[in-house]
Amino acid sequence: MTAPLVVVSGPSGVGKSTVVAEALAQDPGIWLSVSATTRAPRPGEQDGREYFFVSPERFDELVATDGLLEWAEYAGNRYGTPRAAVEERREAEVPVLLEIEVQGARQIREAVPGALLVFLAPPSWEVLEDRLTGRGTESPESVERRLQAAREELAAAGEFDTVLVNADVRECAQALIALVADAHRNS
Ligand code: 5GP
């Protein structure tokens, strides 16, 4: 038996990181995978904590050696889930969360039978737009690319096992923990 793999996906700006951080604070028994990315660190981000920040060449190498469980290009950068750490945790009966965008979630659906796919939706398009434009960490071009991606990603909600609407972070995190616990009981 292995512990469940739960994917949290949804458009940039929907609050995935906030909900996931709250869920981990409430349930430290869940492990969040740390992705590799070719994007530059934002102020305050630390290598190995938010991401493994890697060069495009290193990312190519990870892809070529089958080191990633899934990967995707998003708003001009590449992001991927290191395979080994996820498998080790699951075999040790630790439930694993992935916080990834929609193309990656689709790959997990194909590659990992039994994975639970959760889509995090904003209460409205206006709320999402406000969050993306008001973040202050992105250039206008990056905001525009993320808005475009968000439109496409919202349309994918129906492909997921469950949709959670992020109207309240605590409630949403609790709902996510309950889904992980259910998946663990049934795995
Ligand atoms: P950001 O640049 O804002 O940290 O992330 C951009 C998007 O990439 C977010 O939607 C985030 O969830 C997604 N992402 C982060 N890590 C991964 C990953 O390993 N694989 C995929 N497919 N998407 C990821």
Image (cartoon, helix red, strand yellow):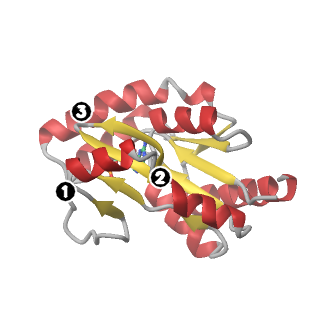
Left or right: 53 with respect to 19? Answer: left
The answer to whether marks 1 and 2 mark residues whose Cβ atoms lie closer than 8 Å is no
The amino acid at mark 1 is Ala
According to the picture, the residue beneath numbered tag 3 turns out to be 145
Residue type beneath disc 3? Arg
Q: Disc 2 marks which amino acid?
A: Lys
* Ligand 1 contact, mark 2 (Cβ < 8 Å): yes
Q: Residues within 10 Å of mark 1 (few under 14, many from 20)?
A: few
Q: What's the distance in space between the residues labelled 3 and 1, CA to CA?
A: 16 Å
Disc 1: residue Cβ within 8 A of ligand 1's nearest atom: no
CA gap between label 2 and label 3 equals: 18 Å
Q: Quadrant of residue 72?
A: top left
Q: Position of residue 153 (x, y in %)?
A: 44, 30
Residue on which disc 2 sits: 16
Classed neighbour count for the residue bearing mark 3: other residues with Cα under 10 Å, few (<14), some (14–19), many (≥20): some
Q: SS of the residue at dot 3?
A: helix
Residue 142's quadrant in the figure? top left
Question: Where's residue 12, x and y in %?
Answer: 38, 43
Q: Which residue is label 1 attached to?
A: 40
